[in-house]
Image (cartoon, helix red, strand yellow):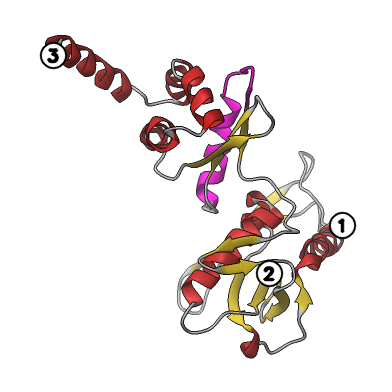
Amino acid sequence: MGIFNKVFGKKEEEADAEIQTYQDFWNWFLTKEKDFHETVKNQIGIETDFFDLMAAQLRKINEGFYFLAGMTDDETVELIITAEGEIKNIVFAEEIIAAAPKLHNWKFTALKPEMNMDSGIRMEDHEFTTENIHFYANEIEGYPDEIDITFVYDHLNSENKNSAVTGVCIFLDNFLGELNFATQIDTFNVIGKNEATKDLIPVIKLKDFLQWREREFTEKYKNIKNFDEEDRFSIFEASLQNGFPLIAAINTSLL
């Protein structure tokens, strides 16, 4: 029996090592999906029999892939591939889900969706809710279109700062949805209530604020001319005072 175990074990390792593409991953997943479904549904051995196996294979495709899984109803397991806010990996999370097979009792989702956060989240004995998180916007000199936001957590202090910042980020990731949180806000920071320098706005109004900024940006640039095939360009060359050349392409049709 020991000989067979060694042989079969070696073949399985070789098969796993061949996972290099999205299709390879889903082909492997199909061989285990029934076991995975039962494991997630019954919550028995989920760490070793599901999460550990999935993590090992996803890492072969992209080190930046993370995932969540749970029941959306009594029979359907939802698997969410997430980039955990890493913008460069968002497109890859979308690609691997686009390549997923259609399976009964499975729902495959790219990136964490927007969720109802009325009850908030709890992390390391701290609650993060729409009642204790606020925000205000900052203006960045020279970058009027940048969205820079200061988030204020009522209970942040010098002792819990790291965990508080992490908790606020997780809250926002779920409140806005992973894609929106990663792309709608250019820069942000998290402070305590005693550090705030402007009037505080309840975080429940954050979505409205971001939509307003998006409309403002669109309105501002909607009349910008797009180049088309009929436009003609000429190349002009000049010399700067330091001797370096200056080369410009000018739309003479527009002139």
Give the mark toward the camera: 2 or 1: 2
Q: Is residue 173 magenta?
A: no
The residue located at (46%, 32%) in the rendering is 44
Q: Main secondary structure of the magenta part?
A: helix
Total residue callouts: 3
Cβ atoms under marks 1 and 3 closer than 8 Å: no
Residue 181 percent coordinates (x, y): 65, 57
Instruction: List x then y, in percent, for residue 139.
Output: 70, 80
* Foreground label between 2 and 3: 3
> Is 46 in front, or is 169?
46
Q: Secondary structure at mark 2?
A: strand
Circle 2 is placed at which residue position? 146
Coordinates of residue 236 in the picture (x, y in percent): 62, 59
Q: Which residue is mark 3?
A: 2
Q: Of label 1 and label 3, which has the lower sequence position?
A: 3
* Residue 56 placement: quadrant: top left
Q: Residue sitting at 52 percent across and 23 percent down? A: 38
Task: Reply above or below: 32 against 77.
Answer: above
Dot label at residue 223:
1
Spatial distance from mark 1 to mark 3, Cα to Cα?
A: 74 Å
Which kind of residue does numbered mark 3 sit on?
A: Gly
- In terms of sequence position, does the residue under pointer 2 or pointer 1 come before the other? 2
- CA separation in Å, label 2 and label 1: 20 Å
Tell me where the magenta segment starts and ends, as one range: 87-106
Give x and y (percent) for residue 186: 63, 65
Q: Quadrant of the N terminus?
A: top left
Mark 2 vs mark 3, CA separation in Å: 63 Å
Badge 1 crowding class, 10 Å Cα cut-off, few under 14, some 14 to 19, many 20 or more, is few
